[in-house]
Amino acid sequence: MTRRPHTLLINPTIASRHSARFPLALLNLAAALDRHGESRIIDGNIDRDTVAEVLSVLDHESFDAVGMTVMGGPHVPEAIRLSRAIREHSPGLPIVWGSYFPTLFTDAALNAPYVDYAVRGQGEDTLVELVSALTGEGPPLSAIAGLSWKDGDRIVHNPARPFSRGNPPPLLPYEKLGDPRKYLSRTFLGHRTVAHQAALGCRYHCTFCGVAAMFGGATALPTAARLERELGYLKYDVGADSVQFFDHNFFDREAEMVPLLEVLARLELPWWCFARADALINLSEESWKLVRRSRLRMAYIGAESPDGQMLKEIRKGTRPDQTLEVAEVCRRHGVIPEFSFMVAPPTHTEEETEQTFDFIRQLKRVNPACEIVIYIYTPLPESSMHAKDRGRHRATPLFDLGGLPVVFPATPDEWAQPQWVNYACHADAPWLDERLRRRIDDFVTVLRCRYPTVQDMRAPHWAKRTLSAMAAWRYRIGHYDRPWELRLANRFVQLRLPQVQGL
Ligand code: B12
């Protein structure tokens, strides 16, 4: 009789308990693993003492492998801590890393003694095949698409796994997380906001985006029946009253979107999603009617830059005039656009940044309700792109402030250094000098005090109004330098930072 493999899946801590959302990657992986064996999930966003929790589980149960989900940034130091502790406790237990970090930086992930396997891209099929190989039942390691592994001292990258529409179960196995209601939280959308992913992937190839590196420009929408079943369960059985969609790009081709919008219009759950300017401005009036009925509250739109040339270089596929147009279209339809920008690019660093500040002011004139998120532009190295996209665009060579070429980290421990955590979080870059860093920080302080985000649920209205009044003169005359009085006031009224905390 064949033995059913048992896998431990871990989400290292990345968010506060209040900000914890369903660990969707692990739920999808568990659904696939449970068809052939068993799995258990530990979510570090809920079980805060994760190392102790994991070791105690290892003391009581036996596993064939541990799978860890690891995004770049603050996930990496946590994943290292956990992997080291597991290796020390159970030296023979295989440790598998999956998600954005090992997909984008595969060699770096495997250059650590505590990572045995790296899964690139979608993980369901690759992990199932890997755990069955580890229990002596499955294909040889070299035949598992999407897997990178160690053959002695050599790192072997098997061919990529083709994009899969997946074979999701009728419902994700939420019960594996205990009471799913602990994943609902109060946001500006509602009292019990839930996270959900409807479509997979994204059809665009933006060079700066990890999603293009993960999916290579492929996408698959859910059927309307599936969306209705999942959201119906979350609304009527779990008690959710609003939804934050994690889809990489919610509005795909209009004809295929209409049935999904009809589901949302029936369910009437206020929602938030990622979207593109071109898709929204091209929606017909009929579809906008559906969008209004469905209660879309906010759409996060990657505006990235006011510079058309830069948008071309990064293969964004939208233009600055479309950003301005979508601000107006959203205003007309009562949807708040949340625009994200990437400032301080590696060339024309200061000029591009100042141009972005001016463009943001222009956007605010078109639609004062629009929200702004500012990141530092931190390009991905060519080696992290999807195999299909490598060599297809001329990557700008990167130099630090001393004129030396930027060398990306070669191990997870190097990626866990604060300057590289900041790079992964789009919060700092080696070509950014102190003066410009301060200038960006000053602009952001004035802007977010002048226009406090509606996503902030903590600060009282009077406090937001006071901050806004205090910041008004600086914003009006464009005097952003050293806003000491706003910083002081911010110590008392801590406004939410959507770029760090999400909703
Ligand atoms: C939810 C989310 C978060 C949450 C928490 C995530 C968590 N793990 O708990 C929060 C808000 C904390 C967060 C933070 C950040 N995030 Co985030 N986040 C997401 C988001 C919206 C959804 C992730 C998700 O659940 N997807 C659904 C699941 C089903 O898909 P998946 O994760 O890709 O999983 C599949 C594969 O990756 C793989 N896989 C995943 N894990 C594993 C594990 C194993 C063992 C295996 C085998 C396979 C495997 O198999 C899965 C199924 O096919 C994504 C965008 C997206 N839609 O994916 C961005 C995204 C992952 N985040 C990203 C980034 C950059 C960040 C930040 C590091 C920086 C930032 N500025 O946003 C911050 C850190 C902020 C901080 N604390 O300072 C990027 C990553 C790109 C990159 N270059 O690395 C993404 C893609 C957004 C983007 N387009 O830029 N994030």
Image (tube, helix red, strand yellow):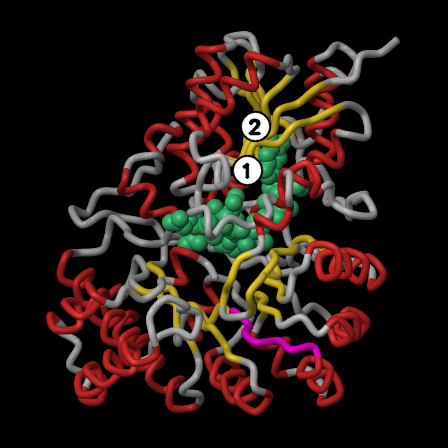
Badge 1 vs badge 2, beta-carbon distance below 8 Å: yes
Q: What residue type is labelled 1?
A: Thr
- Cα separation between marks 1 and 2: 8 Å
- Position of 130 relative to 356 (above/below): above
Q: What residue type is labelled 2?
A: Ala
Residue that appears at 76% across and 44% down: 164
The yes-or-no answer for disc 1 within 8 Å of ligand 1 is yes
Q: What element carries label 1?
A: helix
The yes-or-no answer for disc 2 within 8 Å of ligand 1 is no
Q: Can residue 324 be seen in this view?
A: yes
Residue 450 in the figure: left or right of residue 276: left
- Position of 465 relative to 25 (above/below): below
- Give the labeled residue for mark 1: 103
Residue 247 x %, y %: 63, 58
Residue 299 within the magenta-colored segment of the rendering? yes
Q: Main secondary structure of the magenta part?
A: strand
Q: Residue 148 carries which label?
A: none
Residue that appears at 75% across and 37% down: 31
- Classify mark 1: residues with Cα within 10 Å, few (<14), some (14-19) or many (20+): many
Towards the viewer: 291 or 315: 291
Residue 495 in the figure: left or right of residue 195: left
- Give the labeled residue for mark 2: 118
Q: What stretch is highlighted in magenta?
A: 294-300
Residue 232 x %, y %: 77, 61
Towards the viewer: 116 or 38: 38
Residue 299 in the figure: left or right of residue 446: right
Q: What element carries label 2?
A: strand
Residue 325 within the magenta-colored segment of the rendering? no
Picture quarter containing residue 415?
top left
Quarter of the figure that contains the N terminus: top right
- Position of 402 relative to 340 (above/below): above
- Position of 215 relative to 176 (above/below): below
